[in-house]
């Protein structure tokens, strides 16, 4: 499919939008599709920068013919032979080509020197020392090249050096046309054919050079290679066979390479001819680019699905932990029956409840007497005991639920493919058990301080303040905790606080404050506890939340990629 000239502006805009979106793509979670998605993202960005965008901006610019192929095929020798001088390094040492060499006509130098194409490769002169860097592109000029074309001698596609293989693939992807070189001994190898299959998928203009053909087998080898090319959709590609002859300068005789020079000249002899080649290759490159966006989008969707599931694991663990803490408060299981019984005895419940609680003032006097150090002989001071019991039980509940929540998320993530690294990172930041225990005690202590503030606010009036002072702040706080933990449901095992067993504490509070004030205090006490419980449990879940935030993928990116691809297709079809 050709690209209409009239739609070039819309196409450039759509391709630019795609590039901008891809800059924000990442695959932080090691999901099954992440590797393919990341690879496709890198390749699409490189293809846009190295070839598609610069070529689209200058459709009539000089063509770049990349000479590629496998090890020992004679690529550098072919380049030197086409130029009639030894510009490219050609030796028997492998790999020969480490730093790629681009040879152009002098008048075309500006196009290749300003890094419009292959912008990631720094330009150096061919005479500069080759230090083996894979980030440089050597430049040289030659009068022997046909007008409007440049040759690029690339590293081996099957090099033993990984950086060479990567660079060779990058250079071939930036080519307007391929001059693919193989030898009579290596033409059936798998790696060259994988590259030729890519040429078919991209609809790139290509010629195949069968080099170093021994005498007497040329017809047989050429026929077999032609058949293989036709089977793979390259039957139209020119096939040039070259013998093993080498002249005294180490080059292929000029008459053997003359057909190749003629073919190159025919492709580039004028602007329309060059534009035709460029459009064909460019259209194929854009087709390939759109196809490569599919694994990117699928990989992103997989990331988003896993991230959503991981956040759900955290939310469930948080909900279960807080729900359990609330339940333990509401059903009163945090208060031991024995401690509560002694407390009720102390405030006169066992006697006064049997007689419908005779005098509230008497309760006040009795509790005040204990707090002033004047307990009766048979009435031990219970405030310290009930406080210690309540604080220890609540701290233990917070500790257990927070630890259980963290373990729940850890177990869930262990079962999720792709969450392994996030699970390990979060696990390193979860607080140790001893620290969790200390912070639970501190959380309860701060809640007790909040209760004191609540009591002080409700006792703002003079009369209430005097009554509170006569009873004692500690006793009022203990009674408020018991009322806060009270529930009308009770427990099947008979343990804990129920509405009935909390009645003495409620009576005590109502002796100081009115009933509405007591209800408000209990409500606020529960709310304050819930806030602190959420924060406490959250401290163990925050490491998991943090790694989720670090791995978060914007769902709009996948949508944006698909939209950009649709816009690219629309721009191509608009004038088609």
Image (tube, helix red, strand yellow):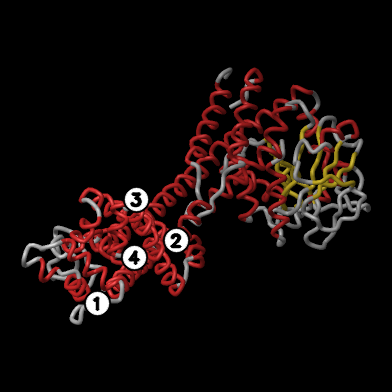
Viewer-side residue, 210 vs 265: 265
Depth-wise, is mark 4 or mark 3 nearer the camera? 3
Occupied quadrant, residue 292: top right
| First in sequence: mark 1 vs mark 2 | 1
Say above or below: 432 vs 322.
below
Instruction: Tell me what residue is drawn at x 68 percent, y 57 percent.
Output: 158
**Image quarter in which the N terminus is found:** top right
| First in sequence: mark 4 vs mark 3 | 4
Label 2: element kind: helix
Question: How far apart are the two marked residues, 1 and 3, measured between alpha carbons?
Answer: 28 Å
Viewer-side residue, 488 vs 245: 488
Q: Is residue 356 visible?
A: yes
Question: How far apart are the two marked residues, 4 and 2, measured between alpha carbons?
Answer: 12 Å
Occupied quadrant, residue 90: bottom right
Query: How far from the left and from the top, in percent, is residue 215?
Result: 77, 53
* Label 4 neighbour load within 10 Å: few <14, some 14-19, many 20+: many
Question: How far apart are the two marked residues, 1 and 2, measured between alpha carbons?
Answer: 43 Å
Q: Which residue is mark 1?
A: 375
| First in sequence: mark 3 vs mark 2 | 3
Q: Which residue is mark 2?
A: 539
Question: How far apart are the two marked residues, 4 and 3, measured between alpha carbons?
Answer: 37 Å
Q: From this viewpoint, which residue is outermost toward the bottom?
A: 377
Say above or below: 149 vs 371.
above
- In the image: residue 388, left or right of residue 143: left
Viewer-side residue, 413 vs 575: 413
Q: Which residue is mark 3?
A: 460
Instruction: Tell me what residue is drawn at x 63 percent, y 54 percent.
Output: 191
| First in sequence: mark 4 vs mark 1 | 1
Depth-wise, is mark 4 or mark 1 nearer the camera? 1
| First in sequence: mark 1 vs mark 3 | 1
């Amino acid at each position: 499919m050709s690209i209409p000239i009239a739609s070039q502006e819309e196409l450039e805009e759509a391709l630019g939008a795609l590039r901008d979106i891809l800059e924000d793509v990442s695959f932080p979670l090691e999901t099954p599709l992440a590797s393919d998605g990341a690879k496709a993202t890198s390749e699409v960005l490189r293809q846009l920068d190295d070839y598609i965008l610069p070529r689209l901006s200058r459709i009539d610019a000089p063509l770049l013919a990349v000479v590629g192929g496998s090890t020992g095929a004679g690529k550098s020798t072919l380049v030197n032979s086409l130029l009639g001088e030894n510009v490219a390094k050609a030796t028997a040492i492998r790999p020969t080509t480490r730093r790629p060499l681009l040879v152009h006509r002098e008048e075309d130098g500006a196009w290749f020197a300003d890094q419009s194409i292959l912008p990631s490769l720094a330009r150096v002169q061919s005479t500069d020392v080759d230090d083996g860097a894979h980030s440089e592109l050597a430049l040289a000029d030659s009068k022997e090249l046909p007008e409007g074309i440049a040759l690029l001698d690339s590293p081996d596609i099957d090099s033993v050096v990984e950086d060479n293989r990567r660079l060779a693939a990058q250079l071939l992807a930036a080519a307007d046309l391929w001059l693919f070189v193989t030898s009579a001994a290596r033409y059936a190898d798998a790696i060259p054919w994988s590259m030729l299959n890519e040429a078919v998928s991209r609809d790139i203009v290509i010629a195949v050079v069968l080099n170093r053909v021994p005498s007497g087998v040329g017809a047989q080898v050429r026929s077999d290679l032609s058949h293989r090319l036709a089977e793979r959709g390259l039957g139209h590609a020119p096939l040039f066979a070259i013998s093993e002859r080498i002249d005294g300068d180490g080059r292929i005789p000029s008459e053997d390479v003359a057909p190749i020079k003629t073919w190159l000249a025919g492709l580039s002899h004028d602007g329309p001819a060059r534009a035709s080649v460029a459009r064909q290759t460019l259209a194929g490159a854009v087709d390939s680019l759109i196809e490569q966006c599919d694994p990117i989008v699928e990989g992103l969707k997989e990331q988003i699905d896993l991230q959503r599931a991981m956040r759900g694991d955290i939310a469930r663990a948080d909900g279960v932990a807080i729900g359990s803490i609330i339940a333990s408060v509401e059903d009163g299981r945090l208060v031991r029956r024995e401690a509560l019984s002694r407390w009720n005895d102390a405030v006169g419940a066992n006697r006064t409840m049997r007689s419908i609680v005779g005098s509230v003032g008497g309760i006040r006097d009795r509790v005040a007497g204990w707090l002033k150090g004047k307990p009766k002989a048979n009435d031990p001071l219970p405030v310290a005991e009930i406080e210690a019991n309540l604080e220890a039980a609540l701290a233990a509940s917070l500790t257990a639920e927070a630890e259980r929540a963290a373990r729940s998320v850890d177990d869930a993530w262990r079962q999720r493919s792709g969450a392994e690294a996030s699970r390990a990172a979060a696990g390193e930041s979860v607080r140790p058990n001893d620290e969790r225990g200390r912070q639970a005690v501190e959380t309860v202590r701060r809640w007790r301080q909040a209760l004191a503030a609540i009591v002080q606010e409700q006792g703002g009036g003079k009369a209430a303040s005097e009554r509170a002072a006569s009873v004692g702040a500690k006793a009022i706080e203990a009674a408020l905790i018991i009322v806060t933990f009270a529930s009308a449901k009770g427990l099947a095992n008979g343990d804990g606080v129920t509405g009935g067993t909390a009645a003495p504490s409620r009576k005590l509070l109502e002796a100081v404050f009115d009933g509405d004030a007591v209800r408000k205090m209990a409500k606020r006490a529960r709310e304050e506890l819930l806030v602190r419980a959420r924060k406490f449990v959250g401290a163990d879940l925050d490491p998991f939340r943090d790694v989720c935030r670090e791995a978060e993928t914007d769902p709009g990116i996948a949508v944006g990629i698909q939209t950009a691809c649709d816009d690219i297709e629309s721009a191509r079809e608009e004038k088609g």
